[in-house]
Amino acid sequence: MPRVTGHEAGAPCWLDLASPDPEASKRFYRELFGWSSYTMALDAFGDYEIFTLGGTQGPRVAGLSALADGAQPPSWTVYFRVDDVDDTARAARAAGGRELFAPMAGLGIGRAAMYADLEGADFALWQPTELAGMEIVREPGAMCWVELASRDIEGARRFYGEVFGWRPVEHRIYRAAPYTAWEVGGRPVGGMVFMDEHWPPHWGAHWIPYFWVEDCDATAWKATDLGARMAIPPTDIRPGRFATILDPTGARLAMITLAPDLRG
């Protein structure tokens, strides 16, 4: 499996799982995706778990940390690569975003910041120095897509266009609802789905990672055997067959078996 050595500005570059029970999360994802992990010490920030694929020496796929406090919900956070955290942070604030934590250094591996968009969906910025991010993407067991679920499509298009310079391209892939693909330099970096009446009314806007699996049905039902809850059962859409689950701690994620013409 070829290793990714860098990510273009505006593209997803890292995933971080905040869990109330890191040990349980490690067991779940090791069983579900075959991940391994090792611990990285981050100075004053404590230990940070790095998930890898194909053994502990394999490529990095994501990170794991304990919840910052009891008010933080279990969740996957998507990090987007930026050239200058401070410049992008100013753009996020100017566009109406809420600062969750200000740009900070001191990790020894890069600079980060976190914001919530106009609907409250959180996302993070990453300016790498040593840790470029995920070392494998679009391979079985790794992230292959990130997606924003939103009830304000036009507001989200304006916000992320101002923050990252993304260009929205509309598609129809599921039911009759519009689907937006975000592009940078003509290349897709993520998507956005409209939260219509079929979505649970108590679900707020959110970003969610998609992981490529060889058999969506088998992996989704295996997840439930391991303690996950099914949010959207295996369903056919234009890009392939996907499902959405809540892991045993309540963090949302999706999995997809890509259509043959989208692989490679």
Image (spheres, grey):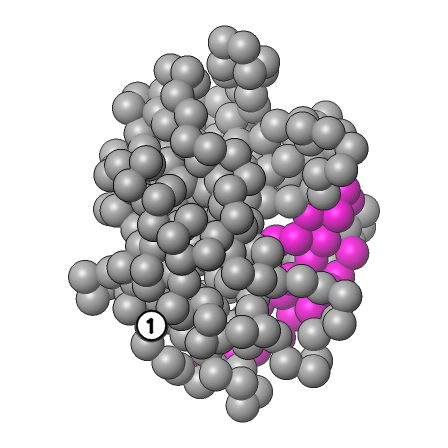
| Figure quadrant of residue 164 | bottom left
**Residue at the image position 71 percent from the left and 38 percent from the top:** 72
The answer to whether 38 appears left or right of 233 in the picture is left
Q: Secondary structure at mark 1?
A: strand
Image height of 32 relative to 176, above or below:
above
Image height of 100 relative to 198, above or below:
above
The answer to whether one can see residue 67 in this image is: yes
The quarter of the image holding the N terminus is top left
The answer to whether 158 appears left or right of 52 in the picture is left
Number of disc labels:
1
Q: 140 or 157: which is nearer to us?
A: 157
Q: Position of residue 231 (x, y in %)?
A: 73, 64
Outermost residue to the left? 185
Outermost residue to the top? 43
**Residue at the image position 67 percent from the left and 28 percent from the top:** 68
| Residue at which label 1 appears | 168
Q: 100 or 227: which is nearer to us?
A: 100
The quarter of the image holding the C terminus is bottom left
Q: Badge 1 local density, few (<14 within 10 Å), some, or many (20+)?
A: many
**Residue at the image position 56 percent from the left and 21 percent from the top:** 48
**Residue at the image position 76 percent from the left and 42 percent from the top:** 249
User: Does the magenta portion include 25?
Assistant: no
* Amino acid marked by disc 1: Pro
Image height of 16 relative to 212, above or below:
above
Task: Kindly report the secondary structure that dominates the magenta region of the rendered protein.
Answer: strand
User: Does the magenta portion include 249?
Assistant: yes
